[in-house]
Image (cartoon, rainbow, N blue to C red):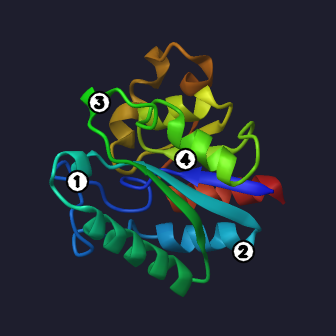
Amino acid sequence: MKLIILDRDGVINQDSDDYIKSPHEWQAIPGSIEAIALLCDAGYSVAVATNQSGLGRGLFDLDALEAIHDKMRELVEDAGGHIAGIYYCPHLPTDRCRCRKPEPGLLDAIAEDFNTTLTGVVFIGDSLKDLQAGVERQCRPILLRTGKGASYEKRLPDELNEQVRNAEVHDDLASAVTSLLLKRS
């Protein structure tokens, strides 16, 4: 099985320091929806792993989050793709849960649901937390410059974990997927 894991905010859609609280606020990054469709066309199952502490902060409710995810799914399906699963952590950073990235709980749930190991699975994110969670489960980390990624890219040389320090870096999801698919062909 070919599986790929994507962060949401800053990878698929525009990020916001004020949180994405409604479908109206959720805006796809140009080329990201088409990139997911290309992955699906190439035989990949696409899973999304996202921290959503806005739930725990009371900034939006579960119905709003589901409406946001419905919008994302519909756009991907309209482009010919499919999101196989969306996994989210609703907790605050202070909750110290196992599902909030950089902890690997969301990835463990993905591995269990897809009945697979994550060794070598590509995990694409825009933060060190994304990369660290992926490396914890032997994923292949890719950092995007979209979202908060450009600021994190500057910190990669200082990162202690060699896999994180040597992560592939791309401008956006479209360029990462193009590179990935060219390497696979």
Choose top left, top right, bottom left or bottom right for residue 77: bottom right
In this rendered view, identify the residue nearer to me: 4 or 181.
Answer: 4
Distance between the alpha carbons at the discs numbered 4 and 1: 18 Å
Residue on which disc 2 sits: 41
Horizontal and vertical percent position of residue 4? 65, 53
Look at discs 3 and 1 and give the one toward the viewer. Answer: 3
Identify the mark nearer the N-term, 4 or 2.
Answer: 2
Along the polypeptide, which appears first: circle 3 or circle 1? 1
Q: Is residue 76 left or right of residue 180?
A: left
Q: CA distance from mark 3 to mark 2?
A: 39 Å
Distance (Cα) linking label 2 and label 1: 30 Å
Position of residue 17 in the picture relative to residue 100 (left or right): left
Real-space CA distance between mark 4 and mark 2, rounded to the nearest whole angstrom = 18 Å
* Residue type beneath disc 3: Asp
- Separation of marks 3 and 4 at Cα, in angstroms: 25 Å
The residue that mark 4 highlights is: 124
Residue at 33% across / 74% down in the picture?
Answer: 67
> Is 119 displayed left or right of 170 in the figure?
right
The earlier-in-sequence mark between 3 and 4 is 3
Picture coordinates of residue 162, whole percent (x, y): 61, 18
Crowding near the residue tagged with mark 4, few <14, some 14–19, many ≥20 C-alpha atoms within 10 Å: many
Q: Amino acid at mark 1?
A: Ser
